[in-house]
Image (cartoon, rainbow, N blue to C red):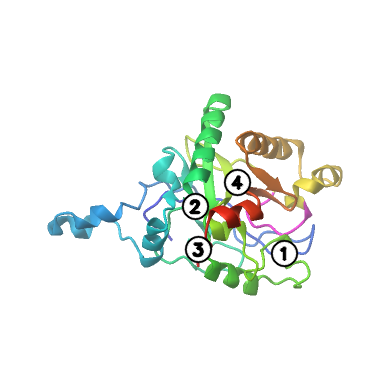
Amino acid sequence: MIKTTIKCGIIALSLMACGEGKNEISEQSAKVSLPKTESLDSLKADPVQKDSLPIVGELEQRLIKAGLLNVQKEIPGTLVDLRYSTKNNFFGKDVYGELTNCYLQPEVIEMLKMAHKALKKSRSSLTFLFFDGVRPQSVQQILWDELDKPDSIKPLYVANPQKGSLHNFGVAVDLTLAKNSNGEALDMGTAFDFFGYPAYPDREEQMLKEGKINQKQVENRQLLRKIMTEAGFKGIGSEWWHFNAFSRKIAREKFDIVK
């Protein structure tokens, strides 16, 4: 499935019990294309040219009107593989529809600009590959319902939509590091949305001893964490790809939940 954004569908997904199981979706080659979204003003262009313009769907229009920004437009050279806009995700459904661009709050974008600048200075051959940014609360409910885990441990992987996720405020981001040359993601030891101990930053030492991940994979994760934390982001213990720009308290004070 190719959408007119930068798509790097190289990472396999799998639901699994903690520390066991294998990914079921094989890796795909990186696919690179021009960014999709134009501003709403661009839709007022010459009618003769409208058919060639990218479609801005209802959800994307709501995000733009709410003041959120397109990450790829604001930080040129980054890549986007919006997983919930494909079927290449842990529940195998496209829940974003026409949306293929990653959106975040402007303050979060500024933090990411700092992080990306630091990354280019440290490792000029690498860039960011984004999996998810703002996530409407309605989509959060779908993820919660589809996650095949007991309710008692679901919050380790998907925030309860009734309480709201930091993704719902547009202040959390899921990302990895990728090569500029071909869009290939660095090996982090597991796929994005891999539900098990090998994906836990908190369990890396244990997973190393058990041979579930290797030292190079840990070093790649450490580079991502260093770049993000120095820009003000905080990671979580169960997902190497997830970073928060603000606490829940501050997010509620500063922003509205995207429904």
Q: Nearer the viewer, mark 4 or mark 1?
A: 4
For marks 2 and 3, the one nearer the N-term is: 2
Q: For numbered disc 1, what is the local secondary structure? A: helix
The magenta segment is 190-197
- Which residue is denoted by mark 4 in the rendering? 245
Label drawn at residue 258: 3
Q: Residue at x 49, y 39 (%)?
A: 110
Q: Are marks 1 and 2 in contact (CB under 8 Å)?
A: no
Q: Nearer the viewer, mark 1 or mark 3?
A: 3
In reply to whether residue 202 is colored magenta, the answer given is: no
In three-dimensional space, the C-alpha distance between marks 1 and 2, rounded to whole angstroms, equals: 24 Å
Residue 111, position in %: x, y? 54, 39
Q: Which amino acid, mark 3?
A: Val
**Location of mark 1 (residue):** 155
- Badge nearest the viewer, 1 or 2: 1
Task: Name the residue located 49 percent from the left edge and 51 percent from the top edge.
Answer: 104
> Could you tell which of marks 1 and 3 lies nearer the N-terminus?
1
Badges 4 and 3: C-beta atoms under 8 Å apart?
no
Instruction: Choose the circle earlier in sequence order: 4 or 2.
Output: 2
Give coordinates of residue 78: x percent, y percent: 46, 41
Label for residue 81? 2
Distance, label 2 to label 3, CA atoms, is 21 Å
Q: Is residue 137 above or below residue 23?
A: below
